[in-house]
Image (cartoon, rainbow, N blue to C red):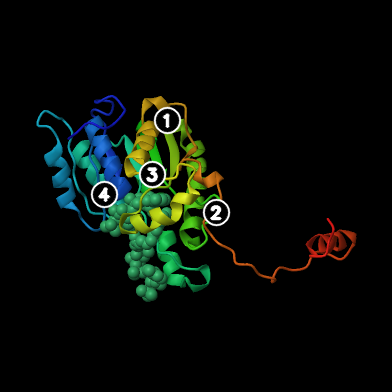
Amino acid sequence: MAASSVFRPGLFKHKVAIVTGGGTGIGKAISAELLELGEWRRDTHYFLRSAEALEMRQKLPPSSPASVTPLQCNIRNENEVKALVLSVLERYGRIDFLVNNGGGQFSSPAEHISSKGWKAVIDTNLTGTFHCCQAVYSAWMKQHGGAIVNIIADMWKGFPGMSHTGAARAAVDNLTKSLAIEWAASGVRVNSVAPVSNYKELGPSLFKMSVPFSPAKRLGVPEEISSAVCFLLSPAASFISGATLRVDAGQSLYHSMWDIPDHSAWPEAPEGENLEALKDLLNPQSKL
Ligand SMILES: CCCCC/C=C/C(=O)SCCNC(=O)CCNC(=O)[C@H](O)C(C)(C)COP(=O)(O)OP(=O)(O)OC[C@H]1O[C@@H](n2cnc3c(N)ncnc32)[C@H](O)[C@@H]1OP(=O)(O)O
Ligand SMILES: NC(=O)C1=CN([C@@H]2O[C@H](COP(=O)(O)OP(=O)(O)OC[C@H]3O[C@@H](n4cnc5c(N)ncnc54)[C@H](OP(=O)(O)O)[C@@H]3O)[C@@H](O)[C@H]2O)C=CC1
């Protein structure tokens, strides 16, 4: 495996990590970087991707002590998550890190999201993350400490067109803060990463659409997200908890991609001299 991490190889030696959705996209980059930095294990989820685990295993140098294990789990199902955590503990005896990366949504105007679709997205991105945090804490981290990183999204200005996932990710941002306080006495650090990066088959079109909205004038790549995750898991972040790191080149501070067409539907301002002044200002004959 070609070394690409900026961190010291062996940093995570003997550590055991669960990375949900660890077989694709950002999760795959996180899995690969953790593998490079030490000995770790990963789960996948309800669509078992043993082919990807095999591919990663084959890239490991023979001398590497690292190992990768695909495990099947749908994070929306509490019992499957509990079984996953027990299975990792039975196999490896500890869980140092949890990365809640598994998630998904579809784009739709809010008015067209069905109740079933809304619940599916909230269940996946909010409840699934909660299930994983709670199960890992109860079964291991409560007694032994650990570090959790939740992958959320750039929803700081709302998420028009994906209101369900925006609401779920904002909730995870808040969950991160609650758990950071509740679990501090167990030595558990809980943080989030809010990425903007290439998005699988939508990558090229999203890339073209969003480049003008990025201060960097390019999208991020999954490797730029995984390094932030590894930093938050590492001892370099030993005094960081309850934080969300925006890995977006400042895009969340810049202008919105959502276009609001010209309209005259907004309610009038209250009557009075300020309204008159406003009308004067907007009057094409105005001398102002
Ligand atoms: C957060 C940063 C995003 C950055 C940019 C992202 C872009 C995109 O995400 S574009 C879309 C890419 N899509 C995917 O990657 C698919 C991800 N999808 C999923 O993970 C899941 O399908 C799910 C969580 C969205 C739904 O889970 P599930 O219950 O397994 O799926 P169902 O197909 O049974 O759907 C249940 C229900 O959800 C509604 N729905 C699903 N897909 C759509 C859609 N494309 N458009 C509108 N509505 C959708 C629908 O109501 C489904 O119920 P039924 O109508 O009875 O099937
Ligand atoms: N790329 C980006 O710009 C951004 C991504 N994100 C979020 O970051 C995370 C990773 O994204 P990315 O790598 O781009 O996308 P991917 O779709 O490649 O990764 C999502 C992973 O989550 C898994 N997953 C979905 N539902 C479940 C479930 N119920 N149980 C277990 N695993 C599940 C998927 O598995 P499967 O493929 O088998 O369904 C997939 O492996 C996601 O949460 C995404 O929404 C947030 C902001 C921006």
Residue 208 seen in render: yes
Tag in front: 3 or 1? 3
Q: Residue at x 40, y 55 (%)?
A: 208
| Amino acid beneath label 1 | Gly
Does dot 2 land on a helix, a strand or a loop?
Answer: loop
Q: Which residue is disc 2 drawn over?
A: 256
On residue 187, the disc is: 1
Q: Residue at x 74, y 68 (%)?
A: 267
Quick check: is the Cβ at mark 3 less than 8 Å away from ligand 2? yes
Q: How many marks?
A: 4
Does dot 4 land on a helix, a strand or a loop?
Answer: helix
| Amino acid beneath label 3 | Gly
| Amino acid beneath label 2 | Ser
Q: Earlier in the sequence, mark 2 or mark 4?
A: 4
Q: Earlier in the sequence, mark 1 or mark 4?
A: 4
Are the residues flagged by discs 1 and 4 in contact, CB closer than 8 Å? Answer: no
The C terminus, quarter of image: bottom right
Tag in front: 4 or 3? 3
With respect to residue 71, does 261 lie above or below?
below
Q: Which residue is disc 3 drawn over?
A: 220
On residue 103, the disc is: none
Classify 10 Å Cα crowding around label 3: few (below 14), some (14-19), many (20 and above). Answer: some
Are the residues flagged by discs 3 and 1 in contact, CB closer than 8 Å? Answer: no
Which residue, as the protein is rendered here, is positioned at the far left?
62
Q: Nearer the viewer, residue 63 or 5?
A: 5
User: Mark 2 to mark 4: distance in Å?
Assistant: 39 Å
Q: Which residue is disc 4 drawn over?
A: 84
Q: Earlier in the sequence, mark 2 or mark 3?
A: 3
Classify 10 Å Cα crowding around label 4: few (below 14), some (14-19), many (20 and above). Answer: many
